[in-house]
């Protein structure tokens, strides 16, 4: 019982920090801070989505970057067609992700363990190659967006701060949604399928149906992150779906500690700040990042929240 | 048309053989140690780079190839002792992350040492010609050598696995590793041997293709994911399955790229056909995987599901 209030406090602190960040950026006269923070929030949404199935369902998806790409390309394709409304972009992204997740999830979930990891990776790679060979949208080079999504026909998101708060609102909403899902009956059954699918089946649940539903929800959430990411960079390319990106999402979840949602948000923040910091130090930052990653895996079992829990 | 088909058939074979050399090491590690190794692709890449450097230093591609084998064996040994050994009892998630970290480290180190510009190595003089097949059709000797060497390796591997004591232990380990550990087999050193051997096979593949492909820092990744597809289709832990699936994937990928647009032209107009063909061809292998898994979740030769 002690952990839950702690988590509520930690969540309040983290989200308050996000809420006041633009004012802090003003005070420091550093507008780049808001740009980085928007990127962090977009990845936090994707990491949150991944933690929902990885932490609660025990499904290690190594292909979640595919949904970032689906979200990002929804923005690119609709904008090209003259549709710029954010709501429609989100709707298209969610619909696209739901279709992709239902088909690939239904096949991947027939398998377990290592097979599942490799198959989700392979399907994401299939999406990657699809967009690489889609020459109408720039193929490998991607496509630059003429403008950001609009809200009610108004180009309000052109302001970095408005985009930041929109992303923040989405993160907060999706976080609360994810918490509600994990506490619901559905969430408990999902956790049950992670712990012991045989018993769940014996007491009358079909693990496959619950896992597939969770997989689709997670994919749709990650697609929302893709929409925000495309708006932040004003640029969409297959690189969004690169398997390194999927790996980074898993890293974020594990950095924060698997299976407590808030950890995913914190993990995304830490991983991206670490990346920014290391890239200032040296252009060969992936080397250092890799070393840190290997060390964390070998010597700290529960990521950041593990350290936190041990100290309190 | 028939000539083109024959040519692409050989190219597909050669690609499949290459995939087999990489997938063989992976599938053993997966099957016996239940271990996910994302770093296998970068070992293939390191093999190619080492072959380039050794060939330049010694002035001979053959010597370079021979030196690459023990060198990649050492790379495998060092990685096993430093990192992998600590991960066997960990969940798959930890293994994925740690080896993903290794991919970042090794890729970046390769770029620091060799730069990011593509490198190449000369095909040795006596293998650089081409042989006539039928009619006016000719095929490069070196590519035939690659196919031959791959087939010999597959045969050797089959002999080791079915006819030797270590092969017997290997098969026993794949069936039940706790049991053979209980029977007094030193499973730790068996793991180390398999690992180093798998790394050497990947390095061998890298060295073999160094003269015909460009050697660049991205070469390990696309092959790694195709090797995953091969293992999944073939069934984890089955070397036989890996061989069949590798040839299948190599042929489907190569033939799909060259004949997909031609076949599509029968049902749509030429420009749409070439466009659709270009988009569909790279996805063909994954569609194949999806179909096979939908029918047989454990792969073609997989015993365990």
Image (tube, coloured by chain):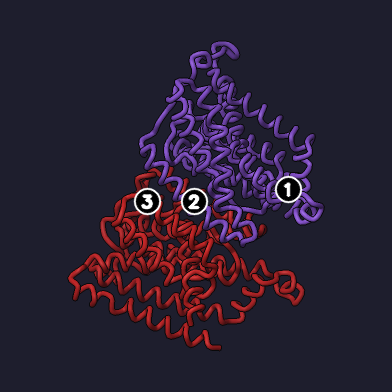
The percent position of residue B39, horizontal first and vertical second, equals 53, 47
Q: Residue A134: which numbered mark, if any? A: none
Distance CA(mark 2)–CA(mark 1): 29 Å
Nearer the observer: mark 3 or 1; the answer is 1
Chain B on-screen colour:
purple
Q: Secondary structure at mark 1?
A: loop
Nearer the observer: mark 2 or 1; the answer is 2
Q: Residue A237: which numbered mark, if any? A: 3
Q: Which chain is red?
A: A
In this rendering, the answer to whether A121 lies above or below A255 is: above
Please determine if labels 3 and 1 lie on a single subunit: no
Residue assigned mark 2 = B102
Disc 3 crowd rating (10 Å Cα; few below 14, some 14-19, many 20+) is: many
Q: Secondary structure at mark 3?
A: loop
In this rendering, the answer to whether B278 lies above or below B36 is: above
First reached walking from the N terminus: tag 2 or tag 1: 2
The percent position of residue B266, horizontal first and vertical second, equals 54, 33
The answer to whether the residue labelled 2 contacts the one labelled 1, judged by CB atoms less than 8 Å apart, is no
Quadrant containing the N terminus of chain A is bottom right
Asked whether residue A26 is in view, the answer is yes
Q: Residue under mark 2: which chain is it in?
A: B
């Amino acid at each position: 019982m002690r952990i839950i209030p702690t988590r509520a406090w930690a969540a309040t602190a983290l989200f308050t920090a996000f809420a006041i960040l633009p004012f802090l950026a003003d005070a420091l006269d550093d507008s780049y801070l808001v740009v980085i923070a928007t990127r962090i929030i977009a990845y936090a949404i994707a990491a949150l989505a991944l933690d929902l199935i990885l932490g609660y369902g025990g499904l290690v998806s190594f292909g979640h970057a595919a949904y970032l790409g689906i979200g990002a390309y929804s923005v690119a394709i609709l904008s090209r067609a003259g549709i710029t409304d954010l709501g429609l972009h989100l709707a298209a992204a969610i619909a696209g992700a739901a279709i992709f997740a239902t088909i690939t999830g239904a096949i991947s979930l027939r398998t377990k363990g290592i097979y599942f990891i490799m198959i989700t990776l392979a399907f994401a790679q299939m999406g990657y190659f699809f967009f690489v060979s889609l020459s109408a949208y720039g193929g490998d080079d991607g496509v630059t967006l003429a403008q950001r999504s609009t809200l009610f026909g108004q180009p309000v998101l052109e302001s970095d701060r408005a985009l930041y708060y929109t992303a923040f609102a989405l993160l907060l909403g999706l976080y609360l949604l994810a918490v509600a899902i994990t506490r619901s009956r559905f969430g408990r059954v999902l956790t049950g399928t992670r712990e012991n699918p045989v018993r769940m089946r014996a007491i009358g649940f079909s693990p496959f149906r619950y896992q597939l539903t969770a997989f689709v929800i997670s994919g749709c959430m990650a697609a929302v992150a893709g929409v925000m990411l495309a708006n932040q960079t004003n640029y969409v390319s297959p690189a969004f779906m690169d398997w390194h990106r999927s790996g980074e999402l898993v890293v974020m979840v594990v950095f924060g500690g698997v299976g407590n949602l808030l950890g995913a948000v914190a993990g995304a923040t830490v991983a991206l700040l670490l990346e920014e910091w290391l890239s200032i130090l040296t252009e060969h930052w992936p080397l250092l990042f890799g070393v840190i990653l290997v060390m964390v895996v070998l010597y700290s079992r529960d990521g950041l929240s593990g350290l936190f829990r041990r100290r309190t | 048309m028939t000539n083109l088909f024959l040519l692409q058939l050989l190219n597909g074979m050669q690609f499949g053989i290459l995939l087999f050399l990489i997938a063989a090491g992976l599938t053993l590690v997966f099957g016996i140690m239940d271990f996910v190794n994302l770093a296998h692709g970068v070992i293939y890449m390191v093999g190619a780079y080492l072959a380039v450097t050794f060939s330049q230093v010694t002035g001979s591609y053959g010597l370079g190839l021979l030196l690459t084998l023990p060198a990649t064996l050492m790379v495998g040994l060092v990685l096993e002792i430093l990192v992998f050994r600590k991960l066997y009892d960990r969940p798959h998630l930890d293994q994925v992350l740690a080896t993903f970290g290794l991919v970042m480290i090794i890729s970046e180190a390769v770029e620091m040492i060799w730069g990011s510009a593509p490198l190449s190595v000369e095909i040795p003089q006596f293998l650089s010609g081409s042989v006539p097949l039928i009619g006016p059709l000719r095929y490069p000797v070196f590519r035939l050598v690659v196919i031959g060497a791959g087939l010999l390796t597959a045969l050797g591997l089959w002999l080791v696995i079915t006819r030797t004591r270590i092969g017997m232990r290997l098969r026993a380990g794949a069936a039940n590793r706790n049991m053979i550990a209980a029977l007094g087999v030193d499973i730790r050193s068996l793991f180390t041997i398999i690992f180093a051997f798998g790394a050497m096979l990947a390095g061998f593949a890298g060295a073999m293709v160094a003269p015909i492909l460009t050697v660049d820092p991205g070469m390990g990744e696309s092959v790694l994911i195709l090797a995953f597809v091969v293992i999944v289709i073939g069934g984890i832990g089955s070397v036989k399955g890996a061989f069949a699936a590798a040839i299948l994937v190599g042929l489907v990928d190569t033939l799909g790229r060259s004949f997909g647009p031609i076949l599509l032209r029968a049902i749509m107009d030429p420009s749409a056909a070439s466009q659709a063909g270009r988009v569909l061809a790279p996805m063909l292998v994954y569609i194949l995987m999806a179909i096979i898994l939908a029918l047989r979740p454990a792969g073609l030769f997989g015993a365990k599901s």
